[in-house]
Amino acid sequence: MLRAYRVAAAVAVGAACSISLPLSALAAPSPGARSTVLSAPAPGAALPGAADPGATRAWSVWQSDGTAWLAGTPQDNPSDGSVIGWRFSAAPDAAAGESPGGDLPSFQTVCGKDAAASGHKRVVVAVDFGDGESDAYPGDRPPAQGVLRCVAGAEDATAAQLLASAAEVRVNAQGDVVTVSGYPAQEQGGAALTPATPGTGAGSGSGLPIALIAGGAGALALLGGGAVVATRRRTRSTAQPTP
């Protein structure tokens, strides 16, 4: 009887060891295994989806071919009937900026069907200030609405000059757009760009400047007035009787 009890006890202990061994093997890490520990982001690091403080940010210009945006340069000379888009965006890897969002604007819808007058062109200008979360500088907020306007400019007006006809624009020494309507606020350099209105471009046609014409007209008026006065004086002196 005692022997049978001992045998039963030994069997029970063996069964318990066989059950506990796999569980302990699962709980303990195997030699050389790496454990993954989730930690909070370091102070000052950009959160996923937030603006990257170190990303390159810039204004880029695009021209529509009717189906998509094609990258351009501020010095491009868009033809009459073109649709130009500007977008402020961040490029973490110094890649090309993003094209304007939303639907492609229609020239006929924005500018109408009237043909451009002689000496100038009409172009649709669309401005996208970018995404406030991923494109804006940390702490900055873009304007709530973009810009969509039909502008007229001289035939040789560049894409940047046409943009200046739709909003206030500042450019750097290389001619790149720095701010549009004062955005982004962190960029304070550059010089104001004068819009190329019809008749002010280099290829807007020949003719004397208005100031020169006005000055010439004034000189002619003075000469004419002096001749009239001299004629009257001669007439009076002739009419007086001799003593």
Image: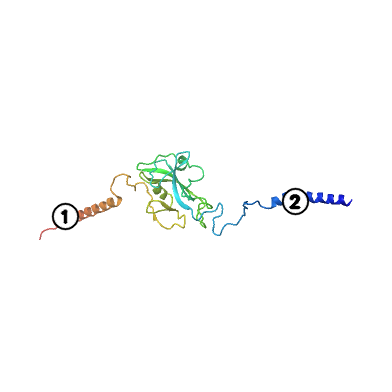
**Image-based side of 21 in relation to 182, left or right:** right
Q: Give the x, y percent position of residue 116.
A: 39, 41
Q: Name the residue: 16% across, 55% down.
A: 235
Q: Give the x, y percent position of residue 57.
A: 47, 52
> Residue reaching furthest left?
243
237 vs 49, nearest the viewer: 49
- What colour scheme was applied to this rendering of the protein? rainbow
Q: Name the residue: 88% across, 52% down.
A: 2
25 vs 2, nearest the viewer: 2
Q: On the image, numbered disc 2 is attached to which residue?
A: 20
**Image-based side of 221 in relation to 87, left or right:** left
| Amino acid type for the residue under numbered disc 2 | Ser
> Residue reaching furthest right?
1
Q: On the image, numbered disc 1 is attached to which residue?
A: 235
Q: Give the x, y percent position of residue 119.
A: 35, 43
Q: Residues within 10 Å of mark 1 (few under 14, many from 20)?
A: few
- Give the SS element for disc 2: helix
**Image-based side of 108 in relation to 120, left or right:** right
Q: Name the residue: 69% across, 52% down.
A: 27
Number of residue marks? 2
165 vs 1, nearest the viewer: 1
- Disc 2 vs disc 1: which is toward the camera? 2
